[in-house]
């Protein structure tokens, strides 16, 4: 029982980590709480449902097209909506409110087109399972975990080992100085939104495969867990977000297994409260020093 719940928690935690990493990419660049992040997470699954079930596209094509479309929409949200707002006002609250509006629009559009009831997510193949002692490991779970870890590693390498990643970190420290050093700040910010949305879209598809269904309420749960994971690890820290997601996933699995499945979603709130009380800067965060 213990090792089965640990395995389940690590798999689901890896997907939470991926969503939190995408959230942290945008936050680390703009210090923006992107409320639309969770809605793109949900949208990716419904796009696959549309292209595979209704348009009869091959399953791999539907998956890839969903990721590309969702990521481009995230980048367009920044380019067409958030960038003009940033040019007109320095208020971060205005940009944050705009992302909330985008989120509301996407979720309501999904409900108008598909309804609010849970939809089965297409899984055209069954890869079977393996047994290690009393632990049952389905191959699709293993693939989900591996895919999430690979994406987290790729995103970390992009942020810390590439020129575009250096531009993101430069903007995070001082946007004006980054411009003076020749960094195309708006292009880098758009890439950050594309990358962050891609992480959310991949995680959304992985979760849909894991549970075999999609519904609009996925947004509420993942948004709180993403924020809790980011805060636990140190908001804006990619390694912290990854670790925070795994911790929340494992805690959820143990609570579901030993207490009751109806209590598992409370863990994000418990973690959020404890972090705010005892370590507001998170595990990998640091206290911001304000000079007067």
Image (cartoon, rainbow, N blue to C red):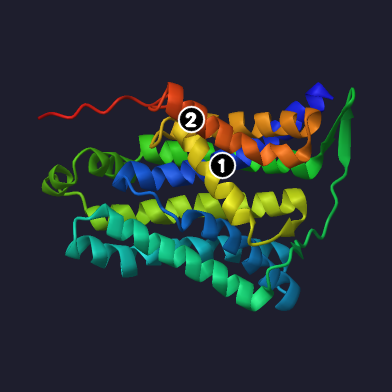
Picture quarter containing residue 31? top left
Classify mark 2: residues with Cα within 10 Å, few (<14), some (14-19) or many (20+). many
Q: Which residue in the structure is indicated by mark 2?
A: 232
Residue that appears at 44% across and 25% down: 277
Residue 259, image x, y percentages: 78, 30
Front one among 110 and 267: 267
As drawn, 69 above or below 218: below
Residue that appears at 9% across and 30% down: 292
Query: Is residue 177 visible to the viewer in this orientation of the structure?
Result: yes
Picture quarter containing residue 218? bottom right
Residue 210, image x, y percentages: 74, 48
Circle 2 sits in a helix, a strand or a loop, which is it? helix
Residue that appears at 36% across and 63% down: 98
Q: Which residue in the structure is indicated by mark 1?
A: 225
**In this rendering, position of residue 244 left or right of residue 263:** left
Circle 1 sits in a helix, a strand or a loop, which is it? helix
Q: Earlier in the sequence, mark 2 or mark 1?
A: 1
Front one among 120 and 71: 120
Classify mark 1: residues with Cα within 10 Å, few (<14), some (14-19) or many (20+). many
**In this rendering, position of residue 17 left or right of residue 31:** right
């Amino acid at each position: 029982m213990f090792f089965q719940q640990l395995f389940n928690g690590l798999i689901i935690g890896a997907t939470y980590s991926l969503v939190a990493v995408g959230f942290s990419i945008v936050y680390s660049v703009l210090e923006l709480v992107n409320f639309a992040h969770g809605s793109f997470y949900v949208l990716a699954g419904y796009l696959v449902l549309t292209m595979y079930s209704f348009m009869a596209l091959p399953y791999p094509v539907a998956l890839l097209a969903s990721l590309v479309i969702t990521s481009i929409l995230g980048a367009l949200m920044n380019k067409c909506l958030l960038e003009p707002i940033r040019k007109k006002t320095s208020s971060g609250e205005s940009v944050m409110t705009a992302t909330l509006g985008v989120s509301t629009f996407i979720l309501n559009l999904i409900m108008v087109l598909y309804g609010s009831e849970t939809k089965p997510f297409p899984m055209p193949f069954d890869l079977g399972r393996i047994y290690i002692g009393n632990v049952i490991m389905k191959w699709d779970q293993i693939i989900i975990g591996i895919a999430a870890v690979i994406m987290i590693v790729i995103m970390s390498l992009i942020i810390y080992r590439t020129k575009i990643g250096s531009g993101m970190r430069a903007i995070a420290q001082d946007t004006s100085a980054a411009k003076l050093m020749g960094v195309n700040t708006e292009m880098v910010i758009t890439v950050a939104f594309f990358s962050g949305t891609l992480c959310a879209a991949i995680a959304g598809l992985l979760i849909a495969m894991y549970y075999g269904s999609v519904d609009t309420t996925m947004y509420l749960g993942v948004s709180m867990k993403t924020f809790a994971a980011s805060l636990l690890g140190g908001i804006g820290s990619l390694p912290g977000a990854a670790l925070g997601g795994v911790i929340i996933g494992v805690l959820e699995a143990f609570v579901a297994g030993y207490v009751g499945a109806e209590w598992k979603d409370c863990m994000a709130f418990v973690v959020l409260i404890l972090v705010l009380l005892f370590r507001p800067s998170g595990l990998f965060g640091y206290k911001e020093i304000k000079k007067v």
